[in-house]
Image (tube, helix red, strand yellow):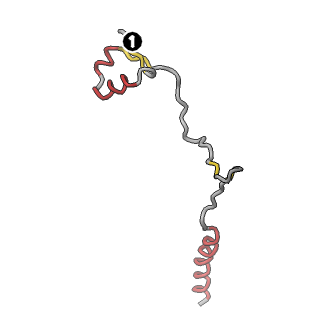
Amino acid sequence: MKYILALTTLILIPFAFGQSKMGPPTKVETINNEGNPIKPIQTKNSRELKKETIEIKKSDFKEMPKQKQKLILKEPEKYTIIED
């Protein structure tokens, strides 16, 4: 009988303490003077756009698939096609 009582208490104690830690996550919102919530500035996973242009040889450009060629021609400020 003692063994059964000891085993059940050992099994049930972690569940009793584990439930107290769980709860809905708290959400913090900062409100500005006008009463509107301020959105946080995203710092993680934000990519910096490079100002450099990518040089592509004319022979390589002709070998590319049509969809890739159209993409390159739509963005002339990003890509420059150079002679071989």
Q: What residue appears at the point 28 percent right and 20 percent down from the top-left corner? A: 63
Secondary structure category for the residue under label 1: strand
**Most extreme residue toward the top, as rendered?**
84
Numbered label tally: 1
Q: Amino acid at mark 1?
A: Ile
Residue at the outermost front position: 34
Residue tagged by mark 1? 82
Residue appearing at x 53%, y 29% in the figure: 49
As drawn, 83 above or below 36: above
Question: Relative to residue 70, is residue 59 depicted above or below?
Answer: above
Q: What is the quadrant of the N terminus in the image? A: bottom right
Whether residue 64 sits left or right of residue 4 in the image: it is left
* Viewer-nearest residue: 77 or 23: 77
**Figure quadrant of residue 83:** top left
Q: Residue furthest bottom?
A: 1
The x and y percentages for residue 72 are: 37, 24
Indicate the quadrant containing the C terminus: top left, top right, bottom left or bottom right.
Answer: top left
Q: Tell me if 7 is positioned left or right of 69 in this view.
A: right
Closer to the camera in the image, 20 or 33: 33
Q: Using the image as rendered, state which of residue 56 and residue 73 is in the foreground.
A: 73
Residue 24 found in image quarter:
bottom right
Name the residue rendered at 30%, 29% in the picture. 67
Q: Quadrant of residue 16?
A: bottom right
Residue for point 28% across, 26% down: 65
Q: Residues within 10 Å of mark 1 (few under 14, many from 20)?
A: few
